[in-house]
Image (cartoon, rainbow, N blue to C red):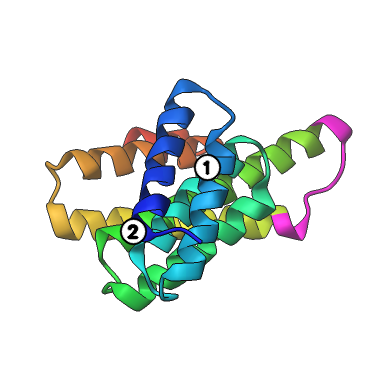
Amino acid sequence: EGSLQTASLLRMLAMYYREMGNPQAEPCLQQSLEIARKICPPSHPLLSVVLNDLGSIWRLLGRYDESESCYREALDIDHLIYPPDHPEILTDMNNLAVLLRTRSNHARSTRERSGDEPTVQEAQDSIEGKTLLHYVRLTDLKRYGHEHQMVADDHTVWAQVLLEEGDREGAKCH
């Protein structure tokens, strides 16, 4: 069956594997998640952390729908645990936003090569991703002020979003 300690150790092993480029990271996280689902209450922080980690791996593998499911479940769990502006929730939102923007950019690039028209999903991903990033950026700014590294990182990401949309002038301001 497993224990909380086993689930945590499997997660740590998965993070080590991920850093080393070892494909065993995914099965370790899946096993960690399986154990955590059996022994933890539905609002346990370990579930959220493992779901975020698994979502990240699946995003990097191009398994966008599975990644989205993990990120959204992690966000739902963290909304049960933390206040709306808590760093864990902002991390979840950022992860989901990056996924949505990645999936939208991938769809756009595929579409442009084939000459197809934009899809509703592509537009929805782009808009929701941008909205989430904007919320994270403003919340971090309010929490940390202009001089914090987190805010500087947020501005860099925001400038990239604006560049992707062709807004070079807006990107220069960030």
Q: Amino acid at mark 2?
A: Leu
Q: Position of residue 24 (x, y in %)?
A: 57, 32
Drawn side of residue 25 relative to residue 114, left or right: left
Q: Looking at the image, how many numbered discs can be counted on the residues?
A: 2
Do the residues bearing badges 1 and 2 touch, measured as CB atoms within 8 Å? no
Q: Amino acid at mark 1?
A: Cys
Tell me if residue 111 is in the magenta stretch: no
Pick the front one: 174 or 3: 3
- Residue denoted by label 1: 28
Tell me if residue 115 is in the magenta stretch: yes
Where is 174 relative to 145, above or below?
Answer: above
Where is 170 relative to 136, above or below?
Answer: above
Q: Position of residue 135 (x, y in %)?
A: 36, 61
Residue drawn at 59 percent across, 29 percent down: 23
Pick the front one: 51 or 128: 51
Q: Position of residue 131 (x, y in %)?
A: 46, 60
Numbered badge on residue 90: 2
The secondary element bearing badge 2 is classed as helix
Where is 165 relative to 140, above or below?
Answer: above
Residue drawn at 21 percent across, 54 percent down: 141
Residue drawn at 39 percent across, 55 percent down: 49
Q: Which residues are magenta?
A: 113-121
Write down the quadrant of residue 165 in the picture: top right
Q: Position of residue 61 (x, y in %)?
A: 64, 36
Residue drawn at 64 percent across, 60 percent down: 124
Separation (CA) of disc 1 from disc 2: 25 Å
- Would residue 174 be seen by someone viewing this image from the given angle? no
